[in-house]
Image (spheres, rainbow, N blue to C red):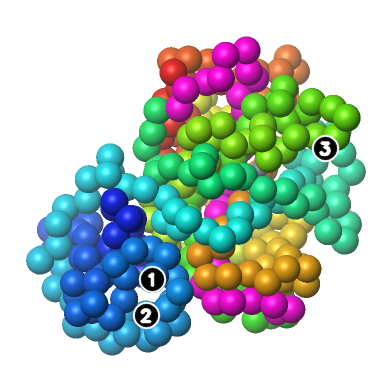
Amino acid sequence: MRIANVADRAYLVVRAGDGTDRLLDIANVSEDRFGPSLVALYDSWEDFRRWADQADLDPESGAPVDRSTLSAPSPRPRQVFAIGLNYDAHAAESGFEPPIDLPPVFTKYVSAFTGPDTDVRLPSGGNVDWEVELVVVIGTETRHVHEDLAWDHVAGVTVGQDLSERITQLRGPAPQFGLGKSYPGFAPQGPFLVTPDELPDRDNLEIGCRIDDEVVQCGRTNEMIFNVPALVSKISENVTLYPGDIIFTGTPAGVGLGRKPQRFLKAGETLHTWIEGVGEMTQRFL
Ligand code: ZN
């Protein structure tokens, strides 16, 4: 199942007979049982899944998808977690040993959230870097969940960029991850929430991005040091996770900070981001 956010209303994304994606307003087709907002949808996620599995839907009645209207699939999570150093080669290019028991956990502020296709203004004097990441959306309240059961607590995944202004991020005496990674537009996500059953292999997906025509990151999510179930399990040891909560799961190697010479995004460049089976995004920098 795929879910879209248009103007803070939740839509099912369904395939019409002509092969195009169409949007069905969830509040309308469920006769107001679910939605209309994404927040309300995640708060009743398990009931919604049961209803959707047996619902008799007519894709032909849906409206075509206009990507310019899409917003982040979970636009107002109670909590946003972001994971650092979760791929060996990225830890190495960042000058760190890979984490053993627990990766670094920080946040991106919700004010940075946008949809999948956006223009992003570069802060003047900043060194803005790219980080493609699989983004997880939690589906049920979760505390102390075992890894073996953790995927059951996930509503779905989407594509994300953890855009990062490195000067702010690394300004001492201790790093400023939250501020450096939360300029307006620095957390694009989308195009849709994709439920794990839709994926070819939910633990092993190609993940990458390119600047204009040059591929700068290309990895696989099975290279994560802490995979999705491990992250959900470990975070839930410390805090309670709520429906709609977001986890940015870390980036593979190839960021600009780790290059020699270092490289950062410039006005006029376009960043294309993809995850196999999940979707694509496009950020144009101004
Ligand atoms: Zn990141």
- Specify the principal SS of the magenta part: loop
Quarter occupied by the C terminus: top left
Q: In x, y percent, where is residue 65?
A: 22, 51
Q: Quadrant of residue 38?
A: bottom left
Region in magenta: 120-145
**Earlier sequence position, callout 1 versus callout 2:** 1
- From the viewer's perspective, is 14 left or right of 146? left
- 131 part of magenta stretch: yes
Residue indicated by mark 3: 92
Q: Are marks 1 and 3 in contact (CB under 8 Å)?
A: no
Residue 68 in view of the camera: yes
Where disc 2 sits, the SS reads helix
Residue indicated by mark 2: 48
CA–CA distance between discs 1 and 2?
Answer: 7 Å
Q: Quadrant of residue 57?
A: bottom left
- From the viewer's perspective, is 120 left or right of 64? right
Q: Quadrant of residue 208?
A: top right
Q: The residue under label 2 is which amino acid type?
A: Phe
Label 2 crowding class (10 Å Cα cut-off): few <14, some 14-19, many 20+? some
- 126 part of magenta stretch: yes
Please name the residue shown 24% across and 83% down the image. Answer: 55
Q: In x, y percent, where is residue 235?
A: 73, 65
Please name the residue shown 33% across and 55% down the image. Answer: 8
Q: In x, y percent, where is residue 28?
A: 18, 72
Query: From the viewer's perspective, is the residue at label 1 or at label 3 nearer?
Result: 1
Q: In x, y percent, where is residue 16?
A: 16, 63
Query: From the viewer's perspective, is the residue at label 2 or at label 3 nearer?
Result: 2
CA–CA distance between discs 1 and 3?
Answer: 40 Å
Label of residue 41 in the image: 1
